Amino acid sequence: MASRVALKLACLACLVVCMARHVRGTKEVFDVTKYAASSDGSAEDNSKAFSDAWNAACHYDGAAALVIPKGTFLVGPIDFKGPCVSDPSPSVQILGELKAPTSVATFSGRSSWIEFSNLHEFVLNGGGIIDGQGAETWKGTNCQHQKKCKQPPISVRFMKTVGGQISNLTLRDSKGFHVAFHHCSSITIDHLNISAPSDSPNTDGIHISGTVNINVTNIFVGTGDDCISIGPGSINVSISDVTCGPGHGISVGSLGKYENEENVVGVKVKNCTLSDTTNGLRIKTWPASPPSEASNITFEDIILKNVSRPIIIDQDYCPIHHCSDEPSRVKIRDVVFSRVTGTTISPIAVTLSCSSSVPCKNVQLQDINLDFVSSGVSEITSSCSNVAGKALGTQNPEPCL
Protein backbone atom coordinates (compact mmCIF):
# COMPACT_ATOMS: atom_id res chain seq x y z
CA MET A 1 0.00 0.00 0.00
CA ALA A 2 2.77 2.39 0.99
CA SER A 3 4.58 1.67 -2.25
CA ARG A 4 1.43 2.51 -4.25
CA VAL A 5 1.06 5.82 -2.43
CA ALA A 6 4.71 6.61 -3.04
CA LEU A 7 4.29 5.76 -6.71
CA LYS A 8 1.25 8.04 -7.01
CA LEU A 9 3.09 10.86 -5.30
CA ALA A 10 6.04 10.40 -7.63
CA CYS A 11 3.74 10.49 -10.66
CA LEU A 12 2.02 13.61 -9.34
CA ALA A 13 5.38 15.31 -8.82
CA CYS A 14 6.41 14.38 -12.36
CA LEU A 15 3.13 15.82 -13.70
CA VAL A 16 3.70 19.09 -11.84
CA VAL A 17 7.23 19.37 -13.26
CA CYS A 18 5.99 18.64 -16.78
CA MET A 19 3.21 21.22 -16.46
CA ALA A 20 5.69 23.80 -15.20
CA ARG A 21 7.99 23.09 -18.11
CA HIS A 22 5.06 23.46 -20.52
CA VAL A 23 4.05 26.80 -19.01
CA ARG A 24 7.64 28.08 -19.20
CA GLY A 25 7.86 26.82 -22.78
CA THR A 26 5.07 29.13 -23.96
CA LYS A 27 5.79 32.81 -24.51
CA GLU A 28 4.10 35.47 -22.47
CA VAL A 29 3.03 38.22 -24.87
CA PHE A 30 3.57 41.88 -24.00
CA ASP A 31 1.55 43.94 -26.49
CA VAL A 32 2.60 47.60 -26.56
CA THR A 33 -1.02 48.70 -27.05
CA LYS A 34 -1.79 47.24 -23.62
CA TYR A 35 0.67 49.77 -22.25
CA ALA A 36 -1.05 52.75 -23.94
CA ALA A 37 0.75 52.80 -27.30
CA SER A 38 -1.58 53.93 -30.06
CA SER A 39 -1.56 54.96 -33.70
CA ASP A 40 -2.71 58.47 -32.77
CA GLY A 41 -0.34 58.80 -29.82
CA SER A 42 2.55 61.25 -29.64
CA ALA A 43 6.12 60.11 -30.19
CA GLU A 44 6.87 60.73 -26.51
CA ASP A 45 3.83 58.81 -25.24
CA ASN A 46 4.49 55.87 -27.54
CA SER A 47 8.15 55.77 -26.50
CA LYS A 48 7.06 55.49 -22.88
CA ALA A 49 4.56 52.74 -23.74
CA PHE A 50 7.19 50.77 -25.65
CA SER A 51 9.62 51.19 -22.76
CA ASP A 52 7.05 50.08 -20.18
CA ALA A 53 6.16 47.00 -22.24
CA TRP A 54 9.82 46.11 -22.67
CA ASN A 55 10.59 46.52 -18.97
CA ALA A 56 7.72 44.20 -18.12
CA ALA A 57 8.90 41.61 -20.66
CA CYS A 58 12.52 41.93 -19.57
CA HIS A 59 11.60 41.35 -15.91
CA TYR A 60 9.29 38.42 -16.66
CA ASP A 61 10.64 35.13 -15.34
CA GLY A 62 9.97 33.03 -18.41
CA ALA A 63 9.85 33.10 -22.18
CA ALA A 64 8.51 36.46 -23.35
CA ALA A 65 7.74 38.35 -26.53
CA LEU A 66 7.16 42.06 -27.01
CA VAL A 67 4.67 42.56 -29.84
CA ILE A 68 4.04 45.72 -31.85
CA PRO A 69 0.75 44.97 -33.64
CA LYS A 70 -0.40 46.18 -37.04
CA GLY A 71 -0.90 49.91 -37.27
CA THR A 72 1.34 52.97 -37.59
CA PHE A 73 3.17 54.21 -34.50
CA LEU A 74 5.08 57.47 -34.28
CA VAL A 75 7.77 56.72 -31.72
CA GLY A 76 10.71 58.70 -30.41
CA PRO A 77 14.07 57.36 -29.23
CA ILE A 78 13.73 54.05 -27.41
CA ASP A 79 16.15 51.64 -25.71
CA PHE A 80 15.58 47.92 -25.31
CA LYS A 81 18.19 47.18 -22.66
CA GLY A 82 19.27 43.96 -21.03
CA PRO A 83 20.33 41.83 -19.41
CA CYS A 84 16.89 40.44 -18.73
CA VAL A 85 15.62 37.96 -16.16
CA SER A 86 14.93 35.26 -18.74
CA ASP A 87 17.48 33.61 -21.00
CA PRO A 88 17.11 33.89 -23.95
CA SER A 89 16.11 37.54 -23.89
CA PRO A 90 12.54 38.44 -24.86
CA SER A 91 11.94 38.54 -28.60
CA VAL A 92 10.52 41.57 -30.39
CA GLN A 93 7.96 41.16 -33.16
CA ILE A 94 7.16 44.19 -35.31
CA LEU A 95 3.95 43.65 -37.26
CA GLY A 96 3.08 47.30 -37.84
CA GLU A 97 4.98 50.37 -38.98
CA LEU A 98 7.24 52.50 -36.80
CA LYS A 99 7.90 56.10 -37.82
CA ALA A 100 10.64 58.29 -36.40
CA PRO A 101 10.09 61.99 -35.68
CA THR A 102 11.24 64.00 -38.70
CA SER A 103 13.35 66.51 -36.75
CA VAL A 104 16.88 65.42 -35.91
CA ALA A 105 16.67 67.71 -32.84
CA THR A 106 14.54 65.00 -31.21
CA PHE A 107 17.68 62.84 -31.06
CA SER A 108 19.98 65.36 -29.41
CA GLY A 109 22.80 63.54 -27.62
CA ARG A 110 21.84 60.16 -29.10
CA SER A 111 23.54 58.02 -31.74
CA SER A 112 20.51 55.90 -32.53
CA TRP A 113 16.75 55.91 -32.78
CA ILE A 114 16.03 52.33 -31.68
CA GLU A 115 18.74 50.56 -29.70
CA PHE A 116 19.05 46.98 -28.45
CA SER A 117 21.84 46.30 -25.96
CA ASN A 118 23.17 43.58 -23.65
CA LEU A 119 20.86 40.87 -24.93
CA HIS A 120 21.34 37.13 -25.39
CA GLU A 121 19.91 34.88 -28.12
CA PHE A 122 17.73 37.78 -29.20
CA VAL A 123 15.18 37.55 -32.04
CA LEU A 124 13.76 40.53 -33.95
CA ASN A 125 11.31 39.91 -36.80
CA GLY A 126 7.65 40.29 -37.77
CA GLY A 127 7.41 41.58 -41.32
CA GLY A 128 6.87 45.20 -40.25
CA ILE A 129 8.35 48.51 -41.40
CA ILE A 130 10.87 50.80 -39.71
CA ASP A 131 10.72 54.24 -41.33
CA GLY A 132 13.42 56.71 -40.30
CA GLN A 133 11.80 59.66 -42.15
CA GLY A 134 15.25 61.03 -42.92
CA ALA A 135 14.58 63.42 -45.81
CA GLU A 136 14.76 66.53 -43.62
CA THR A 137 18.08 65.40 -42.12
CA TRP A 138 19.67 64.71 -45.51
CA LYS A 139 19.40 68.41 -46.38
CA GLY A 140 21.84 69.22 -43.59
CA THR A 141 25.42 68.13 -42.97
CA ASN A 142 26.91 65.42 -45.13
CA CYS A 143 29.40 63.56 -42.93
CA GLN A 144 30.98 61.95 -45.96
CA HIS A 145 32.76 65.24 -46.63
CA GLN A 146 33.94 66.05 -43.10
CA LYS A 147 36.40 64.08 -41.00
CA LYS A 148 34.95 65.39 -37.75
CA CYS A 149 31.17 65.34 -37.97
CA LYS A 150 28.26 64.35 -35.76
CA GLN A 151 26.72 61.42 -37.59
CA PRO A 152 22.91 61.41 -37.90
CA PRO A 153 21.17 58.81 -35.73
CA ILE A 154 21.23 55.17 -36.78
CA SER A 155 17.74 53.75 -37.21
CA VAL A 156 18.40 50.44 -35.45
CA ARG A 157 21.58 49.73 -33.50
CA PHE A 158 22.66 46.56 -31.70
CA MET A 159 25.22 46.81 -28.92
CA LYS A 160 26.84 43.97 -26.95
CA THR A 161 24.29 41.43 -28.15
CA VAL A 162 25.43 37.79 -28.14
CA GLY A 163 23.55 35.32 -30.32
CA GLY A 164 20.38 36.01 -32.23
CA GLN A 165 18.57 36.58 -35.48
CA ILE A 166 17.27 39.73 -37.16
CA SER A 167 14.99 38.93 -40.07
CA ASN A 168 11.92 39.68 -42.16
CA LEU A 169 11.75 43.46 -41.82
CA THR A 170 11.69 46.51 -44.09
CA LEU A 171 13.82 49.54 -43.24
CA ARG A 172 13.65 52.75 -45.20
CA ASP A 173 14.81 56.36 -45.27
CA SER A 174 17.04 56.29 -42.22
CA LYS A 175 18.52 59.58 -41.06
CA GLY A 176 21.91 57.87 -40.81
CA PHE A 177 22.86 54.21 -41.10
CA HIS A 178 19.86 51.89 -41.33
CA VAL A 179 21.21 49.02 -39.19
CA ALA A 180 24.46 48.85 -37.22
CA PHE A 181 26.15 46.19 -35.11
CA HIS A 182 28.80 47.15 -32.55
CA HIS A 183 30.56 44.71 -30.21
CA CYS A 184 28.16 41.87 -30.96
CA SER A 185 28.78 38.19 -31.72
CA SER A 186 27.08 35.22 -33.36
CA ILE A 187 24.32 37.12 -35.15
CA THR A 188 22.39 36.16 -38.30
CA ILE A 189 20.73 38.84 -40.42
CA ASP A 190 18.48 37.64 -43.22
CA HIS A 191 15.59 38.73 -45.41
CA LEU A 192 15.81 42.47 -44.83
CA ASN A 193 14.66 45.03 -47.39
CA ILE A 194 16.54 48.31 -46.97
CA SER A 195 15.95 51.37 -49.12
CA ALA A 196 16.69 55.08 -49.37
CA PRO A 197 17.16 57.42 -52.36
CA SER A 198 20.48 57.28 -54.19
CA ASP A 199 21.28 60.87 -53.13
CA SER A 200 20.68 60.32 -49.41
CA PRO A 201 24.03 60.80 -47.60
CA ASN A 202 25.35 58.60 -44.78
CA THR A 203 22.59 56.03 -45.18
CA ASP A 204 24.62 52.79 -45.16
CA GLY A 205 22.37 49.75 -45.31
CA ILE A 206 24.19 47.56 -42.78
CA HIS A 207 27.28 48.63 -40.85
CA ILE A 208 29.39 46.17 -38.85
CA SER A 209 32.22 46.99 -36.44
CA GLY A 210 33.85 45.28 -33.47
CA THR A 211 31.68 42.25 -34.15
CA VAL A 212 32.59 38.56 -34.38
CA ASN A 213 30.85 35.76 -36.31
CA ILE A 214 28.11 37.60 -38.17
CA ASN A 215 26.19 36.16 -41.11
CA VAL A 216 24.35 38.47 -43.54
CA THR A 217 22.25 36.74 -46.19
CA ASN A 218 19.30 37.29 -48.52
CA ILE A 219 19.29 41.07 -48.26
CA PHE A 220 17.92 43.65 -50.73
CA VAL A 221 19.53 47.01 -50.16
CA GLY A 222 19.65 50.26 -52.13
CA THR A 223 20.76 53.51 -50.48
CA GLY A 224 22.85 56.63 -50.96
CA ASP A 225 25.93 55.11 -49.34
CA ASP A 226 27.52 51.69 -48.84
CA CYS A 227 25.07 48.82 -49.13
CA ILE A 228 27.16 47.01 -46.51
CA SER A 229 30.18 48.49 -44.73
CA ILE A 230 32.60 46.49 -42.60
CA GLY A 231 34.49 48.54 -40.06
CA PRO A 232 37.37 48.02 -37.63
CA GLY A 233 37.31 45.01 -35.32
CA SER A 234 35.12 42.88 -37.58
CA ILE A 235 36.10 39.19 -37.47
CA ASN A 236 34.58 36.27 -39.38
CA VAL A 237 32.00 38.17 -41.42
CA SER A 238 29.97 36.20 -43.98
CA ILE A 239 27.92 38.05 -46.61
CA SER A 240 25.94 36.14 -49.24
CA ASP A 241 23.03 36.50 -51.63
CA VAL A 242 22.87 40.28 -51.33
CA THR A 243 21.25 42.41 -54.04
CA CYS A 244 22.82 45.88 -53.88
CA GLY A 245 21.94 49.04 -55.77
CA PRO A 246 21.85 51.94 -55.90
CA GLY A 247 24.62 52.80 -53.47
CA HIS A 248 28.37 52.74 -53.02
CA GLY A 249 28.77 48.97 -53.21
CA ILE A 250 30.08 46.55 -50.59
CA SER A 251 33.01 47.99 -48.67
CA VAL A 252 35.60 46.92 -46.15
CA GLY A 253 36.28 50.25 -44.44
CA SER A 254 36.88 52.96 -44.29
CA LEU A 255 39.75 51.95 -41.99
CA GLY A 256 42.40 54.02 -40.27
CA LYS A 257 40.33 57.05 -39.45
CA TYR A 258 40.90 56.84 -35.68
CA GLU A 259 43.64 55.82 -33.27
CA ASN A 260 43.81 52.26 -31.90
CA GLU A 261 41.47 50.68 -34.41
CA GLU A 262 41.18 46.90 -34.17
CA ASN A 263 42.09 44.67 -37.11
CA VAL A 264 39.66 43.26 -39.66
CA VAL A 265 40.14 39.51 -40.10
CA GLY A 266 38.12 37.08 -42.19
CA VAL A 267 35.53 38.63 -44.52
CA LYS A 268 33.80 36.53 -47.19
CA VAL A 269 31.41 38.07 -49.71
CA LYS A 270 29.74 35.52 -52.00
CA ASN A 271 26.90 35.20 -54.54
CA CYS A 272 26.01 38.89 -54.62
CA THR A 273 24.66 41.13 -57.40
CA LEU A 274 25.47 44.84 -57.59
CA SER A 275 23.66 47.11 -60.04
CA ASP A 276 24.22 50.80 -60.86
CA THR A 277 26.52 51.40 -57.90
CA THR A 278 29.31 53.97 -57.69
CA ASN A 279 31.71 51.29 -56.49
CA GLY A 280 31.65 47.53 -56.66
CA LEU A 281 33.88 45.54 -54.31
CA ARG A 282 36.00 47.92 -52.29
CA ILE A 283 38.60 48.09 -49.54
CA LYS A 284 39.30 51.65 -48.40
CA THR A 285 41.70 53.18 -45.88
CA TRP A 286 42.51 56.76 -44.94
CA PRO A 287 45.92 58.29 -45.68
CA ALA A 288 48.19 59.09 -42.72
CA SER A 289 46.34 56.45 -40.72
CA PRO A 290 47.52 54.83 -37.50
CA PRO A 291 48.75 51.24 -38.00
CA SER A 292 46.27 48.35 -38.19
CA GLU A 293 45.62 45.40 -40.51
CA ALA A 294 42.94 43.96 -42.80
CA SER A 295 43.47 40.36 -43.89
CA ASN A 296 41.84 37.21 -45.24
CA ILE A 297 39.23 38.96 -47.38
CA THR A 298 37.46 37.15 -50.23
CA PHE A 299 34.97 38.35 -52.84
CA GLU A 300 33.69 35.51 -55.04
CA ASP A 301 30.88 34.69 -57.46
CA ILE A 302 29.86 38.33 -57.91
CA ILE A 303 27.76 39.81 -60.71
CA LEU A 304 28.23 43.51 -61.47
CA LYS A 305 25.84 45.48 -63.70
CA ASN A 306 26.75 48.99 -64.90
CA VAL A 307 29.07 49.52 -61.96
CA SER A 308 31.65 52.28 -61.63
CA ARG A 309 35.04 51.15 -60.29
CA PRO A 310 34.10 47.44 -60.04
CA ILE A 311 37.18 46.22 -58.15
CA ILE A 312 39.04 48.73 -56.02
CA ILE A 313 41.56 48.90 -53.22
CA ASP A 314 41.91 52.56 -52.28
CA GLN A 315 44.47 53.34 -49.59
CA ASP A 316 44.24 57.04 -50.27
CA TYR A 317 40.53 57.30 -49.49
CA CYS A 318 39.74 60.94 -48.86
CA PRO A 319 36.14 62.12 -49.31
CA ILE A 320 36.99 65.40 -47.56
CA HIS A 321 39.22 68.29 -48.57
CA HIS A 322 42.87 68.75 -47.53
CA CYS A 323 43.88 65.21 -46.58
CA SER A 324 47.46 64.47 -45.58
CA ASP A 325 50.02 63.38 -48.17
CA GLU A 326 51.38 60.74 -45.79
CA PRO A 327 50.60 57.14 -46.80
CA SER A 328 48.21 54.86 -45.01
CA ARG A 329 49.67 52.49 -42.43
CA VAL A 330 46.85 49.94 -42.65
CA LYS A 331 48.37 46.67 -43.85
CA ILE A 332 46.25 44.81 -46.40
CA ARG A 333 47.06 41.19 -47.18
CA ASP A 334 45.55 37.90 -48.35
CA VAL A 335 42.79 39.32 -50.54
CA VAL A 336 40.99 37.34 -53.27
CA PHE A 337 38.69 38.60 -56.03
CA SER A 338 37.34 35.47 -57.72
CA ARG A 339 34.76 34.84 -60.45
CA VAL A 340 33.68 38.47 -60.82
CA THR A 341 31.69 39.12 -64.00
CA GLY A 342 29.53 41.85 -65.53
CA THR A 343 29.78 45.36 -66.91
CA THR A 344 31.66 48.49 -65.95
CA ILE A 345 31.02 52.14 -66.76
CA SER A 346 34.64 52.97 -65.87
CA PRO A 347 37.43 52.42 -68.41
CA ILE A 348 39.73 51.47 -65.51
CA ALA A 349 37.82 48.49 -64.16
CA VAL A 350 40.38 47.20 -61.65
CA THR A 351 42.21 49.64 -59.39
CA LEU A 352 44.61 48.31 -56.77
CA SER A 353 46.06 51.46 -55.21
CA CYS A 354 47.94 50.41 -52.10
CA SER A 355 50.11 52.22 -49.57
CA SER A 356 53.73 53.05 -50.36
CA SER A 357 54.46 52.60 -46.65
CA VAL A 358 52.90 49.14 -46.26
CA PRO A 359 52.24 47.66 -49.73
CA CYS A 360 49.45 45.14 -50.17
CA LYS A 361 50.57 41.51 -50.06
CA ASN A 362 49.14 38.37 -51.64
CA VAL A 363 46.31 39.95 -53.63
CA GLN A 364 44.81 37.47 -56.07
CA LEU A 365 42.64 38.03 -59.14
CA GLN A 366 41.02 34.87 -60.47
CA ASP A 367 38.59 34.60 -63.38
CA ILE A 368 37.70 38.27 -63.78
CA ASN A 369 35.52 39.03 -66.81
CA LEU A 370 34.25 42.60 -67.13
CA ASP A 371 33.00 44.38 -70.25
CA PHE A 372 32.70 48.10 -70.89
CA VAL A 373 29.11 49.26 -71.39
CA SER A 374 30.02 51.87 -74.00
CA SER A 375 31.09 51.05 -77.53
CA GLY A 376 33.18 54.24 -77.59
CA VAL A 377 36.10 52.60 -75.77
CA SER A 378 37.85 49.67 -77.38
CA GLU A 379 39.11 48.13 -74.16
CA ILE A 380 39.17 48.52 -70.41
CA THR A 381 42.30 48.51 -68.30
CA SER A 382 43.72 47.87 -64.84
CA SER A 383 45.83 50.05 -62.59
CA CYS A 384 48.15 48.82 -59.83
CA SER A 385 50.52 50.49 -57.39
CA ASN A 386 52.38 49.10 -54.38
CA VAL A 387 50.77 45.68 -54.59
CA ALA A 388 52.14 42.13 -54.79
CA GLY A 389 50.04 39.23 -55.96
CA LYS A 390 49.02 37.12 -58.92
CA ALA A 391 46.35 36.72 -61.59
CA LEU A 392 44.87 33.34 -62.51
CA GLY A 393 42.43 32.09 -65.12
CA THR A 394 40.37 34.43 -67.31
CA GLN A 395 41.41 38.07 -67.04
CA ASN A 396 39.43 40.88 -68.66
CA PRO A 397 40.74 43.52 -68.36
CA GLU A 398 44.38 42.54 -68.71
CA PRO A 399 45.76 42.32 -65.17
CA CYS A 400 48.39 44.72 -63.90
CA LEU A 401 49.66 42.42 -61.17
Image (cartoon, rainbow, N blue to C red):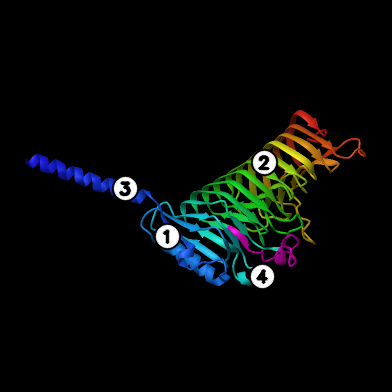
First reached walking from the N terminus: tag 1 or tag 3: 3
Looking at the image, do the residues carrying marks 3 and 2 touch, with CB atoms under 8 Å apart?
no
Which of the two marks, 2 or 1, is nearer to us in this view? 1
**Disc assigned to residue 57:** 1
Query: Can residue 371 be seen by looking at this rendering?
Result: yes
Q: Find residue 344 and report its horizontal and vertical position in percent.
A: 81, 41
Q: Secondary structure at mark 4?
A: loop
Amino acid marked by disc 4: Ser
Which image quadrant is residue 218 in? top right
Q: Is residue 365 above or below residue 82?
A: above
Q: Which residue lies under the disc numbered 3?
A: 21
Horizontal placement of 237 versus 394: left or right? left
Q: Find residue 73 and report its horizontal and vertical position in percent.
A: 57, 64
Taking the view exactly as shown, the residue that stands out farthest to the right is 376
Amino acid marked by disc 3: Arg
* Mark 3 and mark 2: Cα distance apart in space: 52 Å
* Depth order, front residue of 230/64: 64
Which corner quadrant holds the C terminus?
top right
Q: Which residue lies under the disc numbered 4?
A: 103
**Disc assigned to residue 124:** none
Q: Residue at x 79, y 44 (%)?
A: 309
How many residues crowd around disc 1 within 10 Å: few (fewer than 14), some, or many (20 or more)? many
Q: Which residue lies under the disc numbered 2?
A: 333
First reached walking from the N terminus: tag 3 or tag 4: 3
Which of the two marks, 3 or 2, is nearer to us in this view? 3
The boundaries of the magenta stretch are: 135-156
Which of the two marks, 2 or 4, is nearer to us in this view? 4
First reached walking from the N terminus: tag 2 or tag 1: 1
Horizontal placement of 267 versus 315: left or right? left
Looking at the image, do the residues carrying marks 2 and 1 touch, with CB atoms under 8 Å apart?
no
* Mark 2 and mark 4: Cα distance apart in space: 43 Å
Q: Residue at x 37, y 54 (%)?
A: 62
